[in-house]
Image (spheres, rainbow, N blue to C red):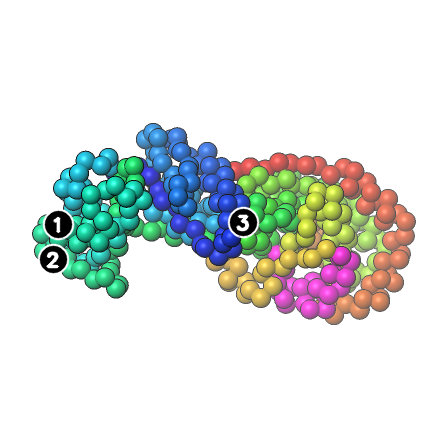
Amino acid sequence: MFTAFLIKYAEIGVKGKNRYLFEDALVQQIKYALKRCEGDFKVHKTQGRIYVDALTAFDFEETVEHLKTVFGISGICPVVYVEDEGFEKLCGTVVKYIDDVYSDKDKTFKIVARRARKNYPLDSMEINREMGGAVLDAYPQMRVDVHKPDIELNIEIREKIYIYSEIIPGPGGMPIGTAGKAMLLLSGGIDSPVAGYMIAKRGVKIDAVYFHAPPYTSERAKQKVVDLARLVSRYTGPIYLHVINFTDIQLHIYEKCPHEELTIIMRRIMMKIAEHIARETECLGLITGESIGQVASQTMHSLAATNEVCTMPVYRPLIGFDKQEIVEVAEKINTYETSILPYEDCCTIFVAKHPVTKPNLNMIKKHEQNLGEKLDELMKTALETDELIIVQA
Ligand code: ATP
Ligand code: MG
């Protein structure tokens, strides 16, 4: 029965002269999401509102699912629209609408009419009153409540007439493309896909980098990261995923540095490489899935030691989250099942039995000197052999 959707978006950040940028980005992201659905749609901006009109038959559930991946949408209202064939006919349509949508009539309601077209014979107040009366005649068990109704029935008089009452929550946030771009350090774990989702939710476009260590990490482990990037790209749009071969660097650290410092030194080098690629691709920051105290490499001391190599801002949206809270988001965005597949991660292969939890930065820097010029060469080679995969849902 529904043939259109009214898209509600938060007003925050859309006031003033930037409003159209926000709306245009939102329209573009909606179009992108709907390309993956069956059916043809027209997405249009009319008098400060965004509508999605179905031009052909479409799958309601599927369409709503995809609209729920568009950041910037706060609510999705399924709309019935009808031709203007007089007020009496309209009342009949509304009475039928209520019956179709609400089988239980033991509810309070209110009619909220808006006239975008002033030549309609009744004004908004008259429509509210007359139509309220027609609904009460049809369903005597319903009651009017103008303050906190169960059902707010919206009637918008435009070229056609729009009827809607349900709001399906959207993901919130800001449309992708309204902020800059950032580089996500994406591993095969639970955390980093969630971290990417959370920063993208603020309108930030995402590129990603994955460090793999063949043959210590398998093709399947890499494929898992590609799969995770694809799941995240449902929300973010296409992701440029850089795959960096980290094996020789890891072996070199393994040979030259104390084993309990391996993880920290490795993470410092990962950050340096990620920052290098970020700079070349016009990213304005890095994103990681770190959270204080989760593992030895994420104590405050370790984070400080890792962070010390970066000059760009590092966004760590999960920093104050407990694991369970992260898992809840991972389940919501459908990355959890993929993240828990048991393929090895390049960090777990070279981990020491007793990694330092309070690294001493001076010691770390001293030991890093053992890596010598060879490290620069290895980093150069790693960057030159960057494999770029464009991932898209
Ligand atoms: P995750 O669940 O995201 O893998 P984790 O709990 O396993 O995180 P670490 O392995 O310490 O934690 O990694 C911390 C962060 O460093 C990750 O969230 C990710 O952003 C980045 N990272 C770790 N390993 C890699 C890798 N192989 N490639 C790219 N980024 C990585
Ligand atoms: Mg990990």
178 or 268: which is nearer to us?
178
Residue matched to label 3: 18
Label 1 crowd (10 A; few <14 / some 14-19 / many >=20): some
Which mark is first along the chain, 3 or 2?
A: 3
Element class at badge 2: loop
- Which stretch appears magenta? 289-311
Quadrant location of the N terminus in the rendered image: top left
Q: Position of residue 283 (x, y in %)?
A: 68, 47
Q: Amino acid at mark 2?
A: Gln
Tell me if residue 269 can be seen.
yes
Asked whether 350 falls inside the magenta stretch, the response is no
Residue matched to label 1: 134
Residue matched to label 2: 141
Q: CA distance from mark 1 to mark 3?
A: 43 Å
Closest to the camera, between mark 2 and mark 3, is 3
Asked whether 294 falls inside the magenta stretch, the response is yes
Closest to the camera, between mark 2 and mark 1, is 1
Element class at badge 1: helix
Query: Residue 175 shows which numbered tag?
Result: none
Q: How many numbered markers are drawn?
A: 3
Which mark is first along the chain, 3 or 1?
A: 3
Q: Amino acid at mark 1?
A: Ala
Q: Position of residue 189 (x, y in %)?
A: 59, 52
Residue shown at 40% from the left, 33% from the top: 42
Q: CA distance from mark 2 to mark 3?
A: 47 Å
Label pair 2/1, CB-CB below 8 angstroms: no
